[in-house]
Image (cartoon, coloured by chain):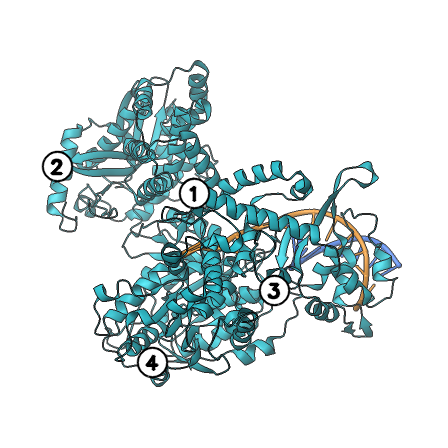
Chain colours: A cyan, B orange, C blue
Amino acid sequence: MTDTAITPNDQQQELIDATEGTYLVDAGAGTGKTFTVTRRYANILDQDDVEPEDLLLLTFTNNAAEEMKDRIVAHCDYSMAALRDAPISTFHSLAHDILLRYGFEAPQILGIDDRITSSTQLLENEVIENERFREFVGRFVRDHPEYEDYFRILSDESSLLNLIKQLAAKGIFPTREGWFRHGERYLDGDFEEFKVYFTEANTANEGANGPTQSDLRDNLGRYGRNKCYLPEAPGKTELRGGRGTKQIDAEWANRAFEEDRSELKQFIHDLYFEYIEFALGRNYLNFSFLLLFAFALLCEDHALREELAFEYTMIDEFQDTSEIQFKLALLLAGTDNICVVGDWKQSIYSFQYASVDNIRRFEERLQTYKGELNNDIERVGYPVENVTEIELTQNYRSTQEILDFSECSLTLPATNNEDFDADDVRESIVSLDADSNNEHSQIKATTGDDEYETLLDRVQEIVDNPEYAVADTDADDGLRPPTYEDIAILTRTRQFGRELQQRADEYGFPVAYEGGVELFSTDQALLLLAWLRILENDADRGWAVVLERAGYTLDEADQILDTEAYPSNMVAFRDELADVETVGGIARRVFDRYGFEDAYADTLVTTLEGVFSSTHINRGEVIQFIERSLDAGSTHEVDDSPGTDSITVQTIHAAKGLEHPIVILANVNQHNFPPSGGGGDAIRYDDTEGLRQTKRYSTVHDLPHVYHSWRHDIRSACLSREYDEERRLMYVAMTRAKDHLLFSAGSSPSALFENLPLESEESVPDVQPADGGGTVQSHLQISIPNREGPVAQSPHTLIDDSVFEDVSDGKGSEFGRRVHEFAERYAEGETVELENSEAYDDKYHVKKFLDSLDGEFRVEEPAYLPLTVDGEEVSISGIIDLLSVTPDNVAIIDYKTDRGQHAKPEYRKQVSVYYLVLSQCFPDREISASIFYTEDGSRVSIDPLTKEELVALVRAEMATSSTIPAG
DNA sequence: GAAACCAGTTTTTTT
DNA sequence: AACTGGTTTC
């Protein structure tokens, strides 16, 4: 959005002008929040006595901070250079800056003598931190045998690290002697609050014939099932009463809540405190500790707090802030000129410790936190009683139809038996008004047994369809038919999106998966891992992968592993790798060898170089890191935008802040949205319950055993799971849509889907392969990386398409695809139906031909050929239809469904590429290449071009193309 | 109809 | 660990 020419609306102007005082801004989706915030900033800055350093602007991401700066510079008298050091940053970078400038002694506040230094590292990688934490725990257990039993009840010690981070995010820290300020109070929980939940759950329900049992008694029907409690535990009947009882005795609220937790608290205290010491000893901090120390420092260093005190404080995306960030902001603010901007309806980061009550109960928390911070001396000197609320309700993104419909997501029951009060929520929703008067929105819901196909079918229906016209100011009537690019498919889970992408690829639909990618499960990473294992003498696991990749069959690979007679070119490569000193170097060489010149390979190299920056490399550590990352499914942003007209697939989380003309919210299925399962580990913290353990190790009855906590089982029966955030996720997804909004589910839709105020249609998909998928006939792509910056991929066909225009008449790509698909399935040994099938003659020829071959079949093998053309690294890739592999020979076969053979010179280029690739993979076998014409069943041998001849062709191609970036 | 029981499912990601 | 949906028992 460019904002130079835009005039603020009245609400925006009110906020821009309201520079003095405390403001809570409810800025709904698409209401021009960033625009207004930056204008307000510029407006404050334009006052005579205000300098950039008086004005604090906090954001959630570095990107947001950068964007803010850019837009501010465009609107005030300051240059980018002048604002370079202005406090426009994330909470974390601000905390980092403060610690580096003033905080070397901050650990002293907790009673730790170690210092933060300018060389203290910020440990960003979670996998590495988990590794360090594991190491720490090993040491901790040795030093504290008295806590041994706690580790017996945990399935995974890294859950303790998450607990530590959760406590830190609330401002609960240990000191050498105890807990920082009133942290310990939080650990005890809140019995009064618990009692409310207990009573609520224990109220008898209304039945048709009088009262029925309370939800609590119902939930406790499973009490003790498959559980083993300590002998002190009450029996099921004692707890629930006999048959016909409607409620359980109120006394159980006390008995379930009250237990001696002093040892548990001591354990967590020692673990937490010593981990902070360990981290400082190893000279690192994590993101949580950054905020922890900055907060502690500002609490206790009164002079510093007064020195920093900002005249104006603004916080963007306030719904994403954690409790400690709120408290930190109160200490940073020097006056009550505080402005928080956000939208509680879009708070979807609770798993990252965001607390939605920061914004929903802003005034209440403001006063509570001020009271806490001022309980011994005055730290917050300004009044917090006068908060003005401003609402931005003018929406510049969606139609009114979509805006109105979106609100229903916040009031949908998320499971079939959830009872939540939708009226409460409904009251607090600030409705949005569409800026446009368009009323063209389609809002529909579809189910289908194969949801992937249903979705593709939908996409096919939408593209170019005037019924799904999207707004376009350049079009005559303001609308134009949609293209792939206009469509975004949003999903709750990453897995669904990835599988959808695969299915879409099979049908030739252009799809771009955006957002984090599981980098370490890519082919690139697995091959790198294999070579590292080979270097580390973990030979079998490494060689197996490498040999398979090179095309050896399982039997051949086994043979090679047994005899250790590895192919000589591979051994030579291994020896070459052994001398490389850095991970980055090894990775680059491996990727070069396989012709990986893509964004994944680049990101892998950068990630590994970032993590293992030290010059001398410990390959074992790298292997372990890759294995753990693979295990943890850790994701990385990969800049792999194909830049072509393609459908966007992303998670709802990744879509936050973005907009799309047409949004399809997919995978609204049971177990997926909302996701079921996954309540934390055996030691956990919760605001109501405080610090608890759900299990206990004991040796009563002389039998060592992990017992379940009967108290926990009663408590969890009172506290039902919250689904508010799932509803908000749905809201976020829906408000991304500008023109049309569709929902999709599979065979078992979730309650969120079923409760939508829409009639859903059942779809019987009939998906046709899309054109331009490039899976038929000519498959070659040349990609040319740009030397500057990330790899720019420009697909070009090496084959002159005009040759085919007058050849494939009447038959077309659909015909070719059918025959190719038949050939693939038959070669893979599937049973295929030939009688009465379309393209009978061609299929018959293929079948007969395949029957005549005696090698082992490999179908649809990808081939990559790296070339150097005039110093430029270029790779040509394609898919080989069929390889027939015998111990001595490899035959390349490419099916062609053309009528006539006059395109043969063009095909020669294609199979030559395959020939050269396979010559490298199978140096010891004879390679032959041929084209199989399915029309008449003839096999034509091809005399391949040499590498030099291919290079010349590519050079010519590059010269005639204007879109290839200049080297 | 209410209650009890059984079997099959199963996450999000930035600093 | 929690939720769905189907079946059995009283």
Judge the density around disc 1: few (<14), some (14-19), many (≥20) Cα neighbours within 10 Å: few
Q: Are marks 1 and 3 in contact (CB under 8 Å)?
A: no
Residue A103 lies in quadrant: bottom left
**Mark-to-mark CA distance, 4 and 2:** 56 Å
Percent coordinates x, y for residue A279 in the rendering: 48, 45
Q: Both on one chain, marks 4 and 2?
A: yes
Q: Are marks 2 and 3 in contact (CB under 8 Å)?
A: no
Q: Is residue A127 visible?
A: no
Mark found first going from the N terminus, 1 or 3: 3
Residue at label 1?
A: A836
Q: Nearer the viewer, mark 1 or mark 2?
A: 2
> Which chain's residue wears label 2?
A
The residue shown at (78%, 46%) is A228
Under mark 3, the amino acid is: Glu
Residue located beneath label 3 in the image = A722
Eyeballing the image, is A926 above or below B6? Answer: above
Question: Who's the residue at 37% across and 66% down the image?
Answer: A659
Q: Earlier in the sequence, mark 3 or mark 4?
A: 4
Query: Chain ID for label 1?
Result: A
Query: Does residue A282 appear left or right of residue A311 in this picture?
Result: right
Q: Which residue is mark 4?
A: A16
Asked which quadrant contains residue A649, the reply is bottom left
Q: Are marks 4 and 1 on the same chain?
A: yes
Query: 10 Å neighbourhood of mark 4: few (<14), some, or many (≥20)?
Result: many
Nearest the eye: A259 or A262: A262
Identify the secondary structure beneath mark 4.
helix
